[in-house]
């Protein structure tokens, strides 16, 4: 008597959904659903010609520019000159459709990021975890990822990081353009210059893009204001959400003498003041420089040890660039007297590329970063007004977020130290996580 083989267990809904997410149609559906949902959520605002987030200010600048008063050209500006491009593009069909065209522009930028991570036709399945992580980051940080300039700079940075090995000139131009929109991608450029064998080609692309932007600004008459974004915030007090502001936030809650949260009307933000607050803001500025130099030295050391001893130098180089870029960028956030919520979009793009090139190493920091992004959105905009009123629960959310930022910085420096200063007492060579061929190197498959 023969036994009938048991029928296979039917797939659960979760398994079917996961399998769908690993297909081209699944990833494309997730991309479309995310952006369509955001447009539908803002549809009542769009049909009335309104704007949300930072867009009212952007649209006002764009309207003033159309009428002849240009940022950079006619007055000092808080942003680099390249930010004029994404701010001016949505005004092409008039101020009424500014919100809609802005969201469509953000969708195009995010598609560029997905094309870099998963291939132009989404054919690189090894890039799907990184692509989904980027979509998750956009969702978790939607109030800033969809409505601030970081929503443009971050996808450009992703594409630049991914294409360093295969398209170095294009990568350099993209990283430079992202830096001229928001300054932080300069940390990526520094890591590339310290590590990459294609640094001269990357530099060439970056210089070409930068010279083009600077020549355009000077020709328009804005040469004297070209670098005003570097000094316009120099004398401000620590911003409410910055890690360095944490002691004064709690001093305000505990009603200690002299500590309070105030409105800075010139910069349209909240700051903390109290005994030592201004000095702390100056100190972290110097600590940022020290941390940046120390990380650069570790990168140079790791370039000689870790990459030099690797079996696959291209893989090790890609991993080191991403790790160094993350360490430098976290230093820019942790040692900064400004702490806006969009700063999480400085880190999330690098984590997404880290998942692409070294998934085992980046699994834990990716989880930390997702939690950090979620807490950031809870702080702003959900609990921001209670935080301004020194509410202990809102301040606890901010404290947890800032603690995670410090933990990410410590993790990145420790990981960089381990590869730069390997233990010579061991007999085995410096370890590099084994890579399947589909995961390496950064760039499009040949």
Image: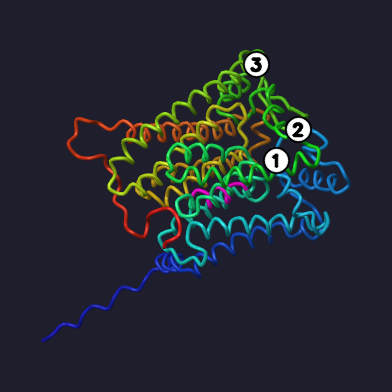
N-terminal of the pair, mark 3 or mark 1, is 1
Q: CA distance from mark 3 to mark 2?
A: 32 Å
Q: Position of residue 19 (x, y in %)?
A: 41, 67
Q: Determine which quarter of the picture holds residue 419.
A: top left
Residue sitting at x 74%, y 31%: 267
Q: Main secondary structure of the magenta part?
A: helix
Task: Check the image and tell me how it is coloured.
Answer: rainbow
Number of numbered labels in the structure image: 3
Q: What residue is shown with label 1?
A: 214
N-terminal of the pair, mark 2 or mark 1, is 1
Question: Magenta residues?
Answer: 153-161
- Between tags 2 and 1, which lies in front? 1
Q: What residue is shown with label 2?
A: 225
Q: Determine which quarter of the picture holds residue 60.
A: top right
> As drawn, is 241 to the left or to the right of 354?
right
Nearer-the-camera pick, 338 or 20? 338
Screen quadrant of the C terminus? bottom left
- Between tags 3 and 2, which lies in front? 2
Residue sitting at x 57%, y 45%: 175
């Amino acid at each position: 008597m023969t036994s009938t083989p048991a029928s296979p267990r039917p797939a659960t809904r979760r398994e079917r959904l996961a399998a769908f997410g690993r297909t081209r149609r699944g990833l494309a559906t997730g991309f479309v659903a995310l952006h369509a949902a955001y447009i539908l959520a803002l549809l009542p605002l769009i049909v009335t010609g309104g704007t949300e987030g930072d867009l009212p200010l952007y649209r006002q600048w764009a309207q003033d520019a159309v009428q002849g008063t240009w940022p950079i050209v006619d007055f000092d500006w808080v942003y680099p000159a390249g930010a004029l491009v994404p701010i001016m593009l949505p005004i092409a069909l008039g101020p009424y459709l500014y919100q809609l065209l802005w969201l469509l522009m953000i969708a195009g930028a995010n598609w560029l990021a997905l094309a870099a991570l998963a291939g132009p036709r989404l054919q690189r399945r090894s890039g799907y975890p990184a692509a989904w992580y980027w979509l998750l980051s956009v969702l978790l940080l939607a109030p800033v990822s969809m409505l601030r300039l970081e929503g443009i700079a971050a996808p450009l940075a992703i594409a630049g990081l991914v294409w360093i090995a295969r398209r170095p000139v294009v990568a350099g131009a993209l990283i430079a353009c992202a830096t001229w929109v928001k300054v932080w991608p300069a940390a990526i450029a520094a890591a590339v210059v310290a590590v990459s064998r294609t640094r001269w080609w990357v530099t060439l692309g970056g210089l070409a893009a930068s010279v083009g932007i600077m020549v355009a600004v000077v020709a328009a008459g804005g040469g004297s204001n070209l670098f005003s974004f570097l000094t316009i915030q120099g004398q401000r007090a620590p911003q409410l959400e910055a890690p360095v502001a944490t002691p004064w936030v709690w001093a305000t809650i505990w009603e200690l003498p002299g500590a309070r949260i105030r409105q800075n009307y010139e910069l349209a933000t909240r700051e903390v003041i109290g005994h030592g607050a201004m000095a702390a803001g100056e100190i972290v500025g110097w600590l940022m420089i020290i941390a940046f130099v120390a990380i650069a030295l570790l990168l140079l050391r790791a370039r000689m040890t870790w990459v030099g001893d690797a079996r696959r130098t291209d893989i090790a180089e890609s991993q080191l660039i991403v790790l160094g870029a993350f360490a430098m960028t976290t230093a820019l956030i942790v040692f900064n007297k400004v702490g806006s919520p969009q700063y999480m979009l400085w880190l999330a793009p690098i984590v997404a590329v880290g998942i692409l090139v070294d998934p085992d190493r980046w699994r834990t920091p990716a989880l930390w970063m997702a939690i950090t992004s979620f807490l950031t959105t809870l702080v702003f905009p959900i609990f921001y007004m209670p935080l301004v009123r020194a509410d202990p629960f809102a301040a606890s959310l901010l404290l947890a977020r800032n603690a995670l930022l410090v933990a990410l910085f410590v993790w990145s420096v420790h990981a960089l130290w381990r590869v730069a200063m390997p233990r010579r007492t061991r007999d085995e060579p410096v370890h590099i996580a084994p890579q399947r061929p589909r995961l390496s190197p950064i760039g499009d498959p040949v």
